[in-house]
Image: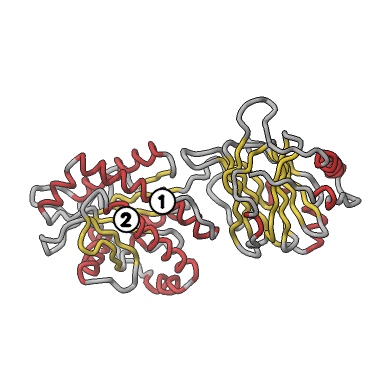
Amino acid sequence: MISILADVSARLRCASGRALLTLLVCLAAVSLFGVDGARADDQSGSDPVVVEAVRTTGTKELSRFVIDVSQPVDFTIFALDEPYRLVIDLPGMDFEVEHGMGQVERALVKNFRFGSFSGSRSRIVLDLTDPVRIIKAQTFPPVDDIPAKILIELEAVEQDVFVKETMKDVMHVDVDGTIDDKRLAVAAASSAVDEAPPEDPRPLVVIDPGHGGIDRGATSRSGLKESELVLTFAKALKKRLEKDGHVRVAMTREKDVFISLSKRVAIARELKADLFVSIHADTVRQSYVRGATVYTLSDKASDAVAARLARQENRSDLLAGLEIEKDDDVVADILIDLTRRETSNHSALYSRTLVGALKSSIRLSKTPERSAGFKVLKAPDIPSVLVELGYLSNSKDQSALASKAWQEKAVESISKSMRTFFLRRSTQSSGLIAPDAG
Ligand SMILES: [Zn+2]
């Protein structure tokens, strides 16, 4: 849908003392707005770029304005005051977003308007609630089925900073990430909310095949070893995720080596993982217990089976002669802080999403969502789950786990669950309704 910014030309003000370039853009805009462009047809004759979604996320201190586009485009951004505004100039676009969707105030954006003019140019105008500094302005290429994006990150500042810095220049941002403004690069580097590296905005998943080396984990009656089985599974999962392409993947181990539980957590934190998934296939006393279970961290176990399993898993470091680290006090402190709570919410969200996805493809245990004090799930800032694919103490699970067909179904569901999770997570934080990810 197209909305014409009829009111903009009257409201554009080119304050004195601004860079000459701003003046030129303002003048150009005023003259261009006199021409009524009803549709944004690309003059080169190829398909016009489509704006698929626009959203604001964040807080009154730090906000993100995100534009999903059908292909990456160059853009220009500059600021105006009285009232505080940002103007984003784009090539000709078709706006396939709801008319009037920019009217809800969110974070630092009071409202926004969009439209096309002169057939070959488009503009988005953001009315701001407060003066801001632009700390990031970037265009990202599409990745798999995640559309290309324009990201503008804003930080609330005093009025004089807005006038002196934000209004100083017109910034031109190229598709290849070049920003024609050094201030922006410096500000982005000091930004407290840095995202994934700009060259690859996809979330990073760390897969943690349990046990390894001296710690063989559980062993089935027929001699299947948990440490080997989960490594094979984790490699298959990694391959699948790389093929699907919606996340980046790393593993805590790719060989039969021992890695302490705290080291596994440290690896995920060093890599700044967005999700940590530990893979296991343990034994439990009750041989009739079967099916997959997803565990999240809790200082109180959800039931006796979970408590026992966590104790069993946490012994892993003892096997290698490592002392159990006295980190419980620290963890208790962390448990009450905000990060921990948000992480815990996200872990629960992923656990639910994963169980939902696995339900349709493999057998689950009677209570597929459980919690206990697993050391390996204690990263305070990374949503973490431990998946028991099945129990090697159950003969049916044991045959399932050894089967290629079962493995394929399971990795497909896990890949799907991650796609859904990251979509839901971004939707939650933006407060917008995203397309159903299934
Ligand atoms: Zn295990």
The secondary structure type at the circle numbered 2 is: helix
For residue 149, side relative to residue 307 (left or right): right
Where on the picture, by quarter, is residue 378? bottom left
x, y percent for residue 360: 27, 50
The reply to whether the C-beta atoms of the residues labelled 2 and 1 are less than 8 Å apart is: yes
Neighbor class of circle 1 (other Cα within 10 Å; few <14, some 14-19, many 20+) is some
Q: Nearer the viewer, residue 342 or 431?
A: 431
User: What's the CA distance linking mark 2 and mark 1?
Assistant: 10 Å
Q: Which of the numbered marks, if any, corresponds to residue 365?
A: none
x, y percent for residue 297: 34, 66
The secondary structure type at the circle numbered 1 is: helix
Query: What residue did someone put label 1 on?
Result: 420
Q: Nearer the viewer, residue 134 or 100?
A: 100
Identified by mark 1, the residue type is: Thr
Judged from this view, the residue extending furthest toward the top is 45
Judged from this view, the residue extending furthest toward the right is 16
x, y percent for residue 388: 24, 56
Neighbor class of circle 2 (other Cα within 10 Å; few <14, some 14-19, many 20+) is some
x, y percent for residue 353: 36, 56
Query: What residue did someone put label 2 on?
Result: 356
